[in-house]
Image (tube, rainbow, N blue to C red):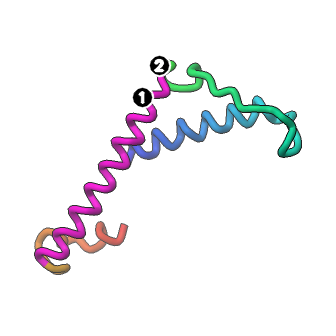
Amino acid sequence: MQLVILVGAKLQHVIAILALENAGITGYLSGAKLRPQDELFWFKKPELLLSLIHFILFQNAFELASFVWFWWQFGYNSCFIRNHTLVYV
């Protein structure tokens, strides 16, 4: 959960910086382009952020698949899904 918040905050920061750089541009067809720089990312490596996003997506998919499998195999009221509040969250 903390990793999702950390990566999301960093992506929000990068988007905000790019928006501030292009704040003077108006109109859709003004011809201006975003110029992302490696300096905006941690350790000047955007690949690190991309790898973290891939890890988070894999982890979420695995958790969802595990939940569906436990539910299908053992039922909703099994000991694997004992805390229903966590299921709803």
User: Which residues lie in the magenta part?
Assistant: 45-74
Q: Nearer the viewer, residue 2 or 40?
A: 40
User: Is the residue under label 1 in contact with that under label 2 (CB below 8 Å)?
Assistant: yes
Residue topped by disc 1: 48
Q: Nearer the viewer, residue 83 or 27?
A: 27
Percent of width and height locating residue 25: 86, 36
Percent of width and height locating residue 28: 83, 45
Disc sitting over residue 82 in the figure? none
53 part of magenta stretch: yes
Percent of width and height locating residue 38: 56, 21
Q: Looking at the picture, does residue 38 appear above or below residue 23?
A: above
Q: Looking at the picture, does residue 18 appear above or below residue 4?
A: above
Disc sitting over residue 43 in the figure? 2
Q: Is residue 56 left or right of residue 5?
A: left
Q: Residue at x 14, y 68 (%)?
A: 80
Amino acid marked by disc 2:
Phe
Secondary structure type for disc 1: helix
84 part of magenta stretch: no
Amino acid marked by disc 1:
Leu
